[in-house]
């Protein structure tokens, strides 16, 4: 494995672990805020904290965008396979898939920077939080998407698309089912000649 790809893989592995921790914290905070909102509506003793609605919404937005970046690394997004697996058209569409993800990441970086800076002039209504912390989600997500897409493309370039997908893609349930069915069909194929010989000797 080339040095560039090896270094990028190690970096992305660390970033992925950090993203998992951040996503776990965001999910925990999101659930806690939602539970508090439900309880405060039914218990007059608890104060109605309107900023909890904003923070839960902001946490949800960050979870979606950061989760999308992790999904790009492992090809967990929806993919329509229109051509037979292993055909030239199928290989081309798989390259287009990862190039399209890289393009989206670059777009998020280019336009997300100005969008994030526009948040400096805006504040959340209830909490007064600067919206730069919310609007910067596109910029941050674009950086992760670009890094993960470059790793996939470099891996496919150096070692082939099949090797890259085997190393990075989340295993497909359909493919695992078909692979588990293949040994049975192979065993039946091996038993068929023996059964035929037995039938001939019996006759």
Image: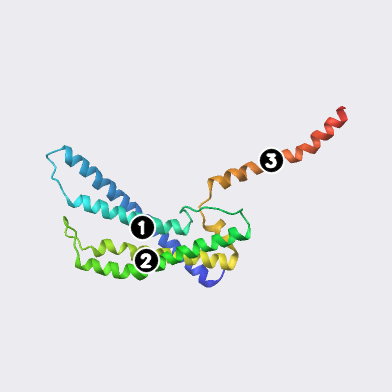
Q: Nearer the viewer, residue 25 or 150?
A: 150
Work out whether 160 lies above or below 64.
below
Residue shown at the point (45%, 61%) measured from the top left = 13
Q: Nearer the viewer, residue 55 or 121?
A: 121
Which of pointers 1 and 2 lies earlier in the amino acid sequence? 1
Circles 1 and 3, Cβ within 8 Å, touching? The answer is no
Label 2 crowd bin: few (<14), some (14–19), many (20+), radius 10 Å = many
Query: Which dot, 1 or 2, sits closer to the camera?
Result: 2
Where is residue 10 drawn, in percent x and y? Answer: 47, 65
Where is residue 128 drawn, in percent x and y? Answer: 16, 60
SS at mark 3? Answer: helix
Which of pointers 1 and 3 lies earlier in the amino acid sequence? 1
Where is residue 192 drawn, in percent x and y? Answer: 77, 37
| Residue 187 shown left or right of residue 142 in the figure | right
Residue shown at the point (34%, 54%) measured from the top left = 63
Q: Between marks 2 and 3, how big is the CA–CA gap?
A: 48 Å
**Quadrant where the N terminus is found in the figure:** bottom right
Residue shown at the point (36%, 71%) measured from the top left = 110
**Quadrant where the C terminus is found in the figure:** top right
Residue that label 2 marks: 108
SS at mark 2? Answer: helix
Which of pointers 2 and 3 lies earlier in the amino acid sequence? 2
Residue that label 3 marks: 185
Tag shown at residue 65: 1
């Amino acid at each position: 494995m080339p040095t560039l790809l090896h270094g990028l893989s190690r970096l992305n592995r660390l970033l992925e672990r950090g993203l998992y921790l951040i996503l776990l914290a965001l999910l925990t905070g999101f659930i806690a805020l939602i539970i508090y909102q439900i309880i405060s509506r039914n218990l007059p003793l608890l104060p109605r904290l309107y900023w909890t609605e904003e923070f839960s919404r902001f946490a949800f937005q960050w979870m979606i965008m950061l989760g999308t970046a992790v999904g790009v690394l492992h090809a967990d997004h929806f993919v329509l396979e229109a051509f037979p697996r292993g055909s030239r058209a199928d290989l081309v569409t798989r390259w287009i898939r990862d190039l399209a993800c890289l393009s989206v990441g670059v777009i998020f970086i280019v336009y997300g920077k100005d969008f994030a800076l526009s948040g400096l002039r805006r504040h959340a209504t209830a909490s007064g939080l600067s919206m730069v912390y919310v609007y910067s989600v596109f910029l941050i997500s674009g950086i992760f998407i670009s890094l993960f897409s470059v790793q996939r493309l470099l891996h496919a370039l150096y070692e082939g698309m099949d090797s890259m997908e085997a190393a990075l893609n989340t295993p497909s349930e359909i493919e695992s089912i078909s692979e588990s069915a293949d040994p049975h069909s192979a065993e039946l194929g091996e038993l068929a000649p023996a059964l035929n010989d037995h039938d001939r000797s019996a006759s």
